[in-house]
Amino acid sequence: MSNQNRIPVAILGCTGSVGQKFVELLSKHPWFEIKELCASDKSAGKKYKEAVDWFLPSPLPDIVGEILVQKCEPVLQSKVVFSGLDSDVAGDVETKFAKAGYKVISNSKNHRMDDNVPLLIPEVNPDHLELIKFQNYGQGCIVANPNCSVIGLVLALKPLLDNFGLEAVNVVTMQAVSGAGHPRVINLDLEDNVIPLIKGEESKVEIEPLKILGRLNKDRISFINFKISAQCNRVNVSDGHTECVQVKLKKKTSVEKIIQTWKEFSSLPQELKLPLSPTKPINYSDEDSFPQPKYQRNFDKGMAVSIGRLRTDSIFDYRFVITSHNTVRGAAGGAILCAELMKAKGII
Amino acid sequence: MSNQNRIPVAILGCTGSVGQKFVELLSKHPWFEIKELCASDKSAGKKYKEAVDWFLPSPLPDIVGEILVQKCEPVLQSKVVFSGLDSDVAGDVETKFAKAGYKVISNSKNHRMDDNVPLLIPEVNPDHLELIKFQNYGQGCIVANPNCSVIGLVLALKPLLDNFGLEAVNVVTMQAVSGAGHPRVINLDLEDNVIPLIKGEESKVEIEPLKILGRLNKDRISFINFKISAQCNRVNVSDGHTECVQVKLKKKTSVEKIIQTWKEFSSLPQELKLPLSPTKPINYSDEDSFPQPKYQRNFDKGMAVSIGRLRTDSIFDYRFVITSHNTVRGAAGGAILCAELMKAKGII
Amino acid sequence: MSNQNRIPVAILGCTGSVGQKFVELLSKHPWFEIKELCASDKSAGKKYKEAVDWFLPSPLPDIVGEILVQKCEPVLQSKVVFSGLDSDVAGDVETKFAKAGYKVISNSKNHRMDDNVPLLIPEVNPDHLELIKFQNYGQGCIVANPNCSVIGLVLALKPLLDNFGLEAVNVVTMQAVSGAGHPRVINLDLEDNVIPLIKGEESKVEIEPLKILGRLNKDRISFINFKISAQCNRVNVSDGHTECVQVKLKKKTSVEKIIQTWKEFSSLPQELKLPLSPTKPINYSDEDSFPQPKYQRNFDKGMAVSIGRLRTDSIFDYRFVITSHNTVRGAAGGAILCAELMKAKGII
Amino acid sequence: MSNQNRIPVAILGCTGSVGQKFVELLSKHPWFEIKELCASDKSAGKKYKEAVDWFLPSPLPDIVGEILVQKCEPVLQSKVVFSGLDSDVAGDVETKFAKAGYKVISNSKNHRMDDNVPLLIPEVNPDHLELIKFQNYGQGCIVANPNCSVIGLVLALKPLLDNFGLEAVNVVTMQAVSGAGHPRVINLDLEDNVIPLIKGEESKVEIEPLKILGRLNKDRISFINFKISAQCNRVNVSDGHTECVQVKLKKKTSVEKIIQTWKEFSSLPQELKLPLSPTKPINYSDEDSFPQPKYQRNFDKGMAVSIGRLRTDSIFDYRFVITSHNTVRGAAGGAILCAELMKAKGII
């Protein structure tokens, strides 16, 4: 696809933390072109470079900086909109856009558990996209990107489920600061500290995987049935969530077989060579002390989950550690990969 | 006890990280007086202030700085020695001192699992001190202080065990840097990072509690029988280990009853009013986001374990978070409390 | 003075960052006893432990936590009040208390440059206390504690001025986070960063020393006359300001003589053995890479300024580095030392 | 230049901190292709991916990882070698390569002050490249990249010198950790700290600019004559040196004129559109609190120097703050830009 034919897209909530990451990743995307930017009334009417308090290390792209920010109203030329809206407004605004015929790919939690909204990880449940046929939004639709801690976890679990079955999953997270919002707005007091609470996070990690790994049953998902327990902590890391995971499997297996299963895992986005697709979804490292967020978060464009330290467990069967980039794979990048899949399937 | 009558003590491994903490805490102790300091041959013969690369925030006490460092040979006037030796030398040196009639309170791992060595937490298993009668060291003995992650954990578990019984304990730690050794020697690369490996730590956390909570059976301990799984991580925190704990109990109970049990927990050191004893061993906080190492590690002289976030768990019965000061309660302070108990019992 | 006879004192702005430090330091003071706590209307009527979001590493003293917070009205029993009020209200409130007969020791900037308000560093200009005779507040008075970066600097400059004369002083600061306010309110985005701006700070550092080092001239101060240039940066350090200082002197001297001059410096608080007085105001270190805030800030109760790296300079005559604890020597501790001097002189 | 015709280059000291940055930047370079990698005897004979302890956030490029590391002997096919060698070996090895006919672009300090070695900043003194004619190395030559703190400083000074003349420059640096070497080898103890000493750094910053800004005088450089005083500190920042600079100028001017001069500054690399050349060498920001290393270090591929806070000074004439990326513009990127200039001039 040449640059002239790129599909125009809009970003809702363009000044926030997720919105800025959407801008960064979409500004150099081969298929999509940022045409319109929407935000709150406070920002509307200003040039993006004046409305935004840009905080990403890579500079704000010049062309995008000149775009006039609009209100979040469904009067856009772009028919594809990425939503990085805060959850206190995302629910209604996204519904309004879908009803008006827009394809909404959302990073907010609001519609994730709606019956006919696919909670999509392109490598894991691409068939769930079928759900949008039942949304009754005409040309429009809503597709939801899961929680940032969930995506890495489910990518690690999917090959285990398919090959060995899952009975129980126990996870303790050590999550990065960037997931909490704009660094000059959110104040976490994390210097020399751990905060053992992320409001609402544990319940998301305990329920979302059951939908994602569920079976498509016409107009809804039959949730899979296994137990998940999640404890979520915030640590002083800029980007990259680390998770200590324990699993109880249905079938006997071995450390070697599990590692092989992970290394061989490949799925539709890899087959379709989607632009943001990681070469391989899982990067298993044999290094003793890996994965570490500082060194693995950017692996394969920040889109692969890194796993290491697989070993047996005295209460569950196995335990291991995963790291994935929470604002790339876990948020904006993951949502863009969803849109790429939709484009490849002719939905966009 | 007036200052003139303080009991002379020596510190083995006085220049290391634990050794310095012993110096800091003992330099103002009401019962003990630092009389002698021992270290490797490299340091022997120098004044302590010249031998040590002091790194604690509180300044090196002047009087202690003038003491001439000796080799680790059992030719000391002090009959009580605190050992902060590295585990590669601690085993033999401590045995040599015990055989020569010294009371050795050790912070090293070497003798912790020896049959007749008490692995002592004064609030938990003071009766285990009886074991030293079977050590055949004459006047001498070895008493071991448990691993820094274990002490906080076992203090939290003890009231649960006594009141509700324990079937399984799952723990994931987020440990502070100070446990790793001297900050200008150890290089952990923890800035903006989590390191999900602490060599040898997980097996200690999985076995030591079973001995500490075991039953004294004449000349040895019958280990208690429940499952422990431990995963250990290093995070960028200066002091204070944080642990996410899940427990399966034998009896049904409630969040309220567990909290009450913790709040009521008090033991022999509290009764004896030992100098370093915390007023209450457990500090339960009702604050949503507590305990945090930055704010709870120094509670009650750094000798109490802080607990919070008790809630039900979908796989185990309950989960909660604990924080305790790893170099005070978890190392030097814990070892000194052991010595205080020995003094109160007439052993010293 | 026995504990029963301690002088009752009040703290204005008791819930803020400086207010909390006043609470910590005064709660164990041998001469003063916290009797009353005042804050904004929002906090008034609550117990202190409920009104305050306590953030200091040492726990909130139990007795103080029970005190009922009052409004900042001059209806107190305590006749001595320490003010840690924000500068947007401090000016009027402090004047009101002084007029009502209270001795106000203020850490705010508002009255620092008032003609008849002593800007007091007890070791440097104790004679300036005479100014309060001209304040026309009857029994009341206002005494101001200088800016946190200024106190360390002027303590280092005073012996140079007295012995060699000063022509110019150039200073670049690297200031700690704790000076910016309550850590859960202020958000500085300092992780992996330096912020080269502290609003209003540079002009304070350029003018306050000229008053402090000035000559008492009946009812006002004749400012001393030399040039100061100050550039102020915020760095990611919890406590302790570090300053790179260059000086042009009037008389020729040598590195050795300057160090000797600093080491010999002692003044009225040392002579009077005031409780918070450092044994020696200046701690010169010969270590190559010292002073470092992490290791020197707590020297001598946090009340001494640490100096190091004195060497010649190609543009000025000499350059050196100083570190001092910004919330102890530079704020609450400094203000309490002022009150101790006032007590020793019979003013309190 | 198509990929097939890229010029083969080698990297000396390929496993070290600068060496890795050379690998990262050259692995995607349009003109140069990494053909050979050299390191110490310990690494020679291994594949690069096995010899190196890769620490950069972006992954080690696969193709480069397969290259067999060689000893640092002048038996290479590549005629262009980039040196990131430690200064304890760089001097002799670089001379040996130059004598054997190799073009050596060095990041080490050893040859920087040699009479006939250009100390090159392509925007500042491209004419100094003439010096290599006098090196008597036949086809070979040595070109030196200046110190990391010097490059940003001199880029800021050059337009001031040309337009207003310089009489004195005072600089205090706050330098990033990455300049100190491999993060898993160097241990700086910078957490919650500032270290006010970087061995040997201050003298480099005081002398190198005088050569770079000097006048080419046949076979050597007539150093420019103005005073520089430099004080160097290490702060806890990953990448990006920040410098507080004061200047005394020869001609009167204004804040506005200086800013305009900086904004208009453009030079030979910009004209030649060299691949790593920044679009504009200087990025002046009007934001109050900029430049900050976290947000400006990556500006324009990490090759521009960011300046802000220009204001008048009471001792000098003006003061301002600069930030530049110390391992890109200040080391590997700067050295590659030198090579690009040499290629454009037909030397390579």
Image (cartoon, coloured by chain):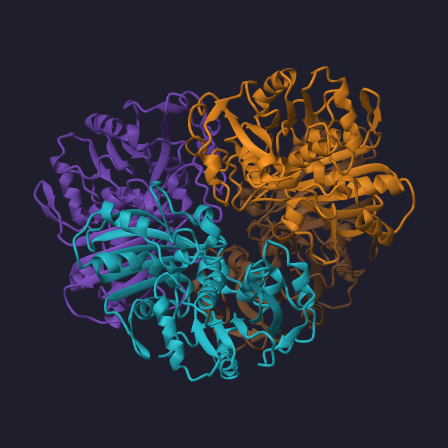
Chain colours: A cyan, B purple, C brown, D orange
**Tally of marks:** 0
Q: Nearer the viewer, residue C279 or A90?
A: A90
The reply, left or right, for residue A248 in relation to residue C269 is left
Q: Nearer the viewer, residue C110 or B199?
A: B199
The location of residue C335, given as percent across then percent down, is: 63, 56
Residue A49 showing in the rendered view: yes
Q: Nearer the viewer, residue A317 or C293?
A: A317
Q: Is residue B172 above or below residue C66?
A: above
The reply, left or right, for residue A298 in relation to residue B114 is right
Residue B266 showing in the rendered view: no
Q: Is residue C42 above or below residue D322?
A: below
What residue is at 46 percent from the left and 83 percent from the top? A137
The answer to which quarter of the image holds residue C62 is bottom left
What residue is at 28 percent from the left and 47 percent from the top? A259
What residue is at 73 percent from the left and 38 percent from the top? C159
The location of residue B234, given as percent across then percent down, is: 38, 47
Q: Nearer the viewer, residue D320 or B242?
A: D320
Q: Quadrant of the C terminus of chain D?
A: top right
Q: Is residue D12 above or below residue A257?
A: above
Q: Quadrant of the N terminus of chain D?
A: top right
